[in-house]
Image (spheres, rainbow, N blue to C red):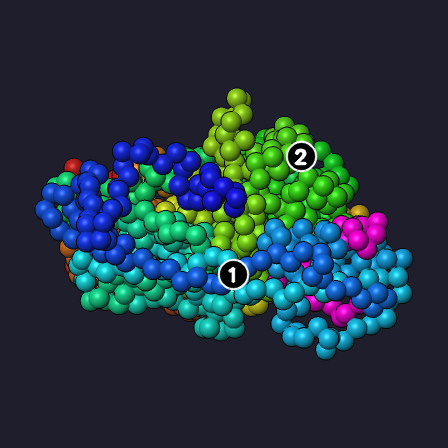
Amino acid sequence: LRRKNMSDLAGAMVRTCGTAAHRVGAPTTLGASAAMAHGNLRVQTRADGSMSFSRVDNGEVLLSAAPSFKFNGADSAPAAGEWTSIEGEITSSCSGSEYDGSLGSSATAAECLSKAVAARALGSRINYAVWRGDSNLGCFVCDLTDRGDPGAWKYLKQPGAVSFVGPPVPPAGAGYFESNLTVTAGNPREVVYGLGQGNWTSEGGCPASGLAGARIVPLERNGQRVNLQQRKFHVSIPFVYSTAGYGFLWNMPGYGEVSIGAHGVGGAHWSSSAALYIDFWISGLPSEVAAPSAAPIYKQYADATGHSPLLRDRALSFWQSRNRYKSSAIALSVAERYQKIEPPLDVGVLVIDYKNQLHDGDFEPNRACYPDIRALSDGVRAMVNASTMFSFWPEVLSSSPMSSVLSGRGCLINRDLGGRAFDATIPECRDFIWSTMLKPIYYDHGVDSYWLDETDGEGTGGGGDGDYGYNTSFGPAVAYSQLWVNDWLSMFSDPVAAQPAQTESPLVLTRGVWAGGQRHGIVLWSSDIHSSFEQLASQVPQGVHASMSGIPWWTTDVGGYGCGFASPNDSPYMKELIVRWYQFGCFSPVFRTHGCRKGPSEPDTDACRPAQGSCGFNEIWSYGADTQVLLEKYVRLRATLKPYLQELNHNVSAQGVPTMRPLAYEFPADANCRGIDDQYMLGPTFLVAPVTAQNATSRKMYFPAGARWQSVLHPASTPIEGGQTLSVPAPLDEIPAFVRVLAGRPGSGYAA
């Protein structure tokens, strides 16, 4: 383990994970067993390696778990003598391979070979290197194992170049074990929630067309199979909550999958493709607390993996963003126009989107477009009292001046889109970026919130949209890829929290996060989605999935990003869609609009013309005066919800509870709450039923039994008795949202 840099492997867990007194001894003789209790949880190990977990107070068996291992075959790093050299010839491009990138310039062919041999020894999946020689001193590497016999490869003449062909790359996971854990339910009627967001589409640049890219993923995970590798659109979190009264974390950070047992069967089969161990965490309910009480499980999970800090107050307000504000002048003009709206709107965050740098990896904005960061952040705060957020991507392009600096420090790893990924798992690399770039360039000039795009592995490995991952300091992607993202998030959050003058919690918007990442003050969003009603419908359960997986603060691109499908801003379709999405955003944990719109924008004619277009306007006035009235209505309604959201914020931080909840979470005794995927509870009080069908003027809605429900938009109306399904009005300017009537409080007093 020390050889593989795992002596301090934290994974999802905080770095100190309890005392030795909580360890259970293994059986010492065949047929023997060992057992101990911790709190109300009793674990018994058996001679065959299996375990059972039960409650101490009543003896109820929660689950049994049986591990197994299968060796993936040996792996060896070939020496320089095992590589064949071919002078004056190179083979055709290998840009579609798992690893394709530059190892920097090399003065000689021998130096290039030495670098390739060293990279292979460190886990890079490469068996071909080329030194460009007289025309280019670059040393480029990739994996051509899938091309078969090197003698049959097609070569091109390249005077002065030298090619090197090494032994085939072993299968992914060679040198490791496939690790499996079969979980048998103590209560086969258990219902399982969690596992992160995803599975509404296949991974790729944009969601698949039509309903194939907008599937409704049921909140009850029973009978589902989930790929645990993080990819674009798929932020898998290997944590589940069972209504049998336990929480379970598969603390394995490599490729893998889980199959949850069907209804009436329960249990699960967890698998990791490459590992040297099995590590999982389980927690049961305290004594005398009966299942399916969920809150104690989430508190214990947060205690183990880290509590979410308080979301800063401004982040509970409306967030304004669009595909790109390509200069300070444009961003300030947007803030100024919001300032002129009367009565004032509560805008909490203004986002300066990606491509604000000349090259990805500069960690500095283009000074021609953003000449004074302090003037920008102070100006936005003076006009609308909002945080200014800048965007960063984790790839470092070879054209960036930082490429050679970071490469020389050992901070760059495998291919990532057009460059190489930054290895955030090395503390010295994180410290270098913060101390030399983020702090002096951004933080010291008033920017203390950051948008971290492409944190789901998109483009890694030389092709695809996240089907490879990160070869970090811990080891190859197949075994440790998921460890990368939380360390990347920490680079933008932990130093902010440590600053003596910092008065607000860190704020990081991210497209990816792993188990435990909530402790870094993150907001997760669901990536580059269609601007369609079908996509809106698919997103409603995704927020609940994320929250039930320990990631409480979640949002979408309100209005959709427009990736793969979008309609013009002035079209009846888009004007209706943006209203319905604002309504959903108003009752989401975070209310943030963003997208690449089809409509007018600032002309791309000045020095700040970006490499990609800015797309159309996406402010509340961008869809016509009639639509602006409706959008303003929900920005203003959000402001009235702030006291409730602030109280919920404190409970989330202190108790680890979810923000978006299945109806059955709050009403477990009401069987009719089961299987409802198009409604949710925002905290314990608000019952929300977003309208996701085009041209709808009403929708069916179930009101849980055991409560009375008061309309949020019609507070003078008669409360509705729970335990019935009704067709409720939903004209374009209304979302069916109801508040639980609390005994002892007049009207619809909110309490989180």
Secondary element type, mark 1:
loop
Confirm whether the magenta stretch covers residue 102.
yes
Q: In which quarter of the image is residue 657?
A: top left
Q: Position of residue 727 (x, y in %)?
A: 26, 65
Q: Is residue 143 above or below residue 551?
A: below
Q: Mark 2 points at which residue?
A: 437
Cα separation between marks 1 and 2 = 42 Å
Q: In the depicted view, which residue is nearer to us: 221 or 747?
A: 221
Q: In this view, does 389 lie to the left or right of 683?
A: right
Residue at the outermost bottom position = 152
Near-viewer residue (582 or 102)? 102
Q: Which amino acid does label 2 sit on?
A: Met
538 and 185: which is toward the camera: 185
The magenta segment is 90-112
Q: Which residue lies furthest to the top in this view?
A: 500
SS type, badge 2: helix
Q: Where is residue 519 in the image (x, y as percent from the top left)?
A: 43, 38
Mark nearer the N terminus (1 vs 2): 1
On the question of residue 622 being in view, the answer is: no
Examine the image and state in which quarter residue 352 appears.
top right
Residue at x 20%, y 67% (from the top left corner): 264
Above-or-below relation of 639 to 108: above
Give the amino acid at mark 1: Ala
Q: Where is residue 616 in the image (x, y as percent from the top left)?
A: 64, 57
| Above/below status of 28 relative to 460 | above
Instruction: Tell me which residue sits at (40%, 41%) in the image.
Output: 13
Q: Quadrant of residue 418?
A: bottom right
Label number found at residue 632: none
Residue 288 appears in the figure: yes
- The residue where tag 1 is placed is 74
